[in-house]
Image (cartoon, rainbow, N blue to C red):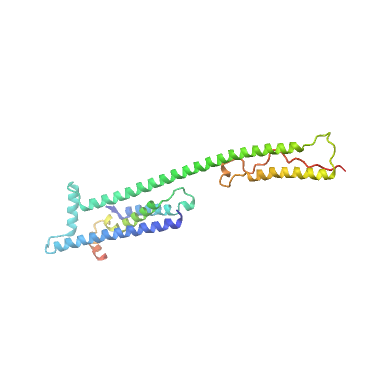
Amino acid sequence: MLKEWQFNVLFFVGVGGAILLLIGPEIGLSIGSNPTAVTGVGAILTYVLTQKKSLTTNGSKPKEETDNGSDR
Amino acid sequence: MDLTDRFWFLILGCCIGFVLGYVVRLLQTIEKEVEEIKHKDDPDYIPEKKEEVKKLKRRSWKWPTWLTFNRIAVALVVYLTAVAAWQAQQAVNKFEEAQQASVEDRCEAGEALRDAVRSTVEAVYKLAIGAAERKENDPPLTAKEAVQYNDYISRVNTFREVQYANLQPTPECAPYVDDFGKKPPTPPYPLYELSK
């Protein structure tokens, strides 16, 4: 389980990588892009974002877990 | 792959991730509600305590739980995606290098061929000019002969200039060859001037 700030740091690093994959060739970076990498990065980032509550802990806040039931 | 294609592939990935995440959260919610229903008549049941028991069970190295398999599956998908992307990029790099090497070889072969043709053109030019070359002791030409002579010399000079102009590399090969804009080695043979 990650703390929320740790999750945010990792998530924004991932977002930075996705942006680099997206616009890298346009700004002269020889990073190259292929469909698998771009799709995979987008899928992983979005999946991780949807699972944020189950991956992070804000200290002892177990009520947030039961609040998920009302998100449907 | 241009920017628009990359953007739409990213959106596709986000949609896939969103659907997967939604399905997983839905299953987790259903699991919790089923547990609550199972234990609704148990006043001592506390869901948070079940999480603590789960953690304790994990620490005692018993059979892995569904959550462990879930995490392993996610890690495997991430790893396979990264490996597939890396290998695809390596293949693309190799293909581009081979293509570049092929272009350079083709350009160098073209330069050798053009040099051979230029040698032939020079040989023909020298033969043609040699046939009309005038020595110092030769008698002067009449006006009519001078016109015919100059017409012949002009046609031979033009032949050489046109051949050299046509024997040029393509713009694609220009960075790899040295004969771009190459001119004949000698100036055009002078025309006959009638003495007054």
Q: Is residue A46 visible?
A: yes
Observer-nearest of B99 and A57: B99
Observer-nearest of B129 and B45: B129
Observer-nearest of A69 and B25: B25
Q: Is residue A65 visible?
A: no
Location of residue B30 in the rendering, given as x and y in whole percent from the top left corner: 21, 62
Image quadrant of residue A52? Answer: bottom left
Q: Residue at x 21, y 53 (%)?
A: B66
* Quarter of the picture holding the C terminus of chain B: top right
Q: Residue at x 25, y 52 (%)?
A: B70
Q: How many marks?
A: 0
Location of residue B69 in the rendering, given as x and y in whole percent from the top left corner: 23, 51
Q: Residue at x 38, y 59 (%)?
A: B11
Location of residue B48 in the rendering, given as x and y in whole percent from the top left corner: 19, 58
Determine whether, in the image, residue B120 is placed left or right of residue B94: right
Q: Is residue B25 above or below residue B167?
A: below
Image quadrant of residue B117? Answer: top right
Q: Residue at x 39, y 57 (%)?
A: B10
Determine whether, in the image, residue B76 is placed left or right of residue B101: left
Observer-nearest of B1 and A29: B1
Location of residue B164 in the rendering, given as x and y in whole percent from the top left corner: 66, 43
Q: Is residue B66 above or below residue B156?
A: below
